[in-house]
Image: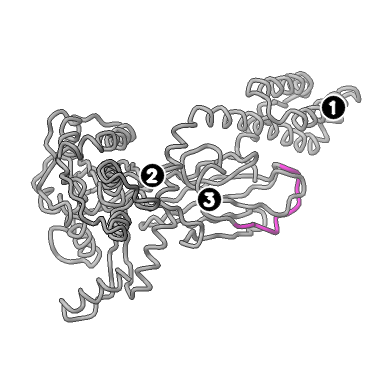
Amino acid sequence: MILGKMREIAERYLGNKVKNAVVTVPAYFNDAQRQATKDAGKIAGFNVIRIINEPTAEAIAYGSDKMKNWKDAKNILVFDLGGGTFDVSLLTFDNGLLEVLATDGDTHLDGEDFDQRVIDHFIKLFKTKKEKDVGKNAHTVENFVVKLKKRNEFYFSEILTRAKLEELNMDLFRSTMKPVENVLQDAELEKSDIADVLLVGGSTRIPKIRQILKEFFNGKEPSRAINPDEAVVYGAAIQEAILAGDDCIIDEIVIIDVNPLTMGIEVKDGAMSNIIPRNSHIPKTNKQIFTTVRDDQDTVTVRIFEDERPIAKYNHFLGEFDLTGIPLAPRGVTQIDVTFDIDVDGVLTVTAEEKTRGNKKNIMINSKTNRLSSNEIDRMIKVAELFADEDKIVKERINAKNELESYIYLLRNQLKDLKTFFEELLSKEKSIITNAIENQIKWIDTNPNVKVDQFRKQKKQLETIILQIMSKIHGYNVNNTRSQSSQYYGEL
């Protein structure tokens, strides 16, 4: 509805039809939200030729008429704090190239949270002065006023000073520096490397926010060169002009953006195999090779997630599909290529291909695949930080178990094919190898959740047994098995 109304206003002002559009979104929008925005533009009658992040748009507006005078690269930090979102991006301008180095944010921290602190404060005052309770569901501006009207208590006046506003929200104001620290760390830059700090969003007009930013950057004043409410629109217009091929200085800007969250798939035991890391430049294509988890497995399920936790189920589920028709083979033999492709709009396509027969299937992640709300994003980011150490332990245990299992099954499959080697072994030695492999399989089945060092100890014991026996065979090296067991990123 909003995009449709904007198109009507633009057409009325310009006097002709408007079809193409560049749409901006918060930097921390996930893949489903970007696709939903693109779909909304299409429904409104637009051909959405590009989706760009809001901080990128402001940086374009800021640098389009300045960079021709810059002799050296300039690092710009964009601090975007509006009424509904908050994100921080670090970009660099270098000889016409605008590159996004890192982005971070908190999609739950914004101007509405500041308002909520004020409303909660006034509700407490009302209860104290009127000795009445406005009841439940009054914790928004609208509901608070409605409740007062219904009780004929609409006359309620209090002064909110700037000092009181800062007191009520100081912890929230200071928490805005965490994403700033994160992008500096991700980009491996120091505070002194930042040439300018740009402000976007109405909440950046709060004096205390500007003061905290100034103090963080050791006295550097945030830039006031661009209206924080209009900068994003200017940048989007410039981007559209670039794409339209307008003959002006702005066509010298080349933009390289990043994806805000890690993307990957779930592998055996629920681990997350990261295929495209967060803050990777887009467009981006990455491929990893996986294998089967069972003998004679003819189908694999590719489950796609995004977020930062090493256990897939704790991340945001994007979608899934089955790749069928896989030729029957022992576990660990079949090669399955999984490719992640993110386009310039940040929209993801995932493809899985079995190499022997060339079976292929893909999925485009869109708005129907469990769109993530701002509250859910915020919760997941905080949980990831809270359980980082615990997740690391679980991830290491899963990796150690998978390494042992992969080694066992790849070794078993190889030994089945090495008939000439077996002919040179005594019957007793053949039995030792077979029993060692089967005993390890049984041990894993009965000890699936032991500590990392126990999995590694079992693998070392098996390697020792195999090495002692196979070294008797001229020209055989157990390292052949080790190298092959490490060619896959996981089992599906």
Vertical position of residue 329 compared to residue 8: above or below: above
Q: Is residue 89 visible?
A: no
Cα distance between the residues tagged 1 and 2: 47 Å
Q: Which amino acid, by three-letter code, is at mark 3?
A: Phe
Q: Which amino acid, by three-letter code, is at mark 1?
A: Asn
Left or right: residue 68 versus residue 483 is left
49 is within the stretch colored magenta: no
Label number found at residue 107: none
Q: Secondary structure at mark 3?
A: strand
Q: Circle 3 is placed at which residue position?
A: 317
Choose top left, top right, bottom left or bottom right for residue 19: bottom left
Cα distance between the residues tagged 3 and 2: 20 Å
Q: Secondary structure at mark 1?
A: helix
- The crowding category of the residue bearing disc 3, from other C-alpha atoms within 10 Å (few below 14, some 14 to 19, many at least 20), is some
Left or right: residue 66 versus residue 485 is left
* Residue nearest the observer in this picture, 94 or 468: 94
Q: Circle 1 is placed at which residue position?
A: 435
Q: Is residue 386 visible?
A: yes
Cα distance between the residues tagged 1 and 3: 41 Å
| Span of residues in magenta | 321-331
Q: Which residue: 64% across, 35% down?
A: 484
Mark 1 against mark 2, which lies toward the viewer? Answer: 2
Q: Which residue: 19% across, 37% down?
A: 164
Q: Position of residue 384 (x, y in %)?
A: 46, 36
Q: Which amino acid, by three-letter code, is at mark 2?
A: Ser
Q: Which residue: 61% across, 41% down?
A: 270
Q: Secondary structure at mark 2?
A: loop
- The crowding category of the residue bearing disc 1, from other C-alpha atoms within 10 Å (few below 14, some 14 to 19, many at least 20), is few
Vertical position of residue 410 compared to residue 356: above or below: above
Q: Circle 2 is placed at which residue position?
A: 280
* Residue nearest the observer in this picture, 126 or 92: 126
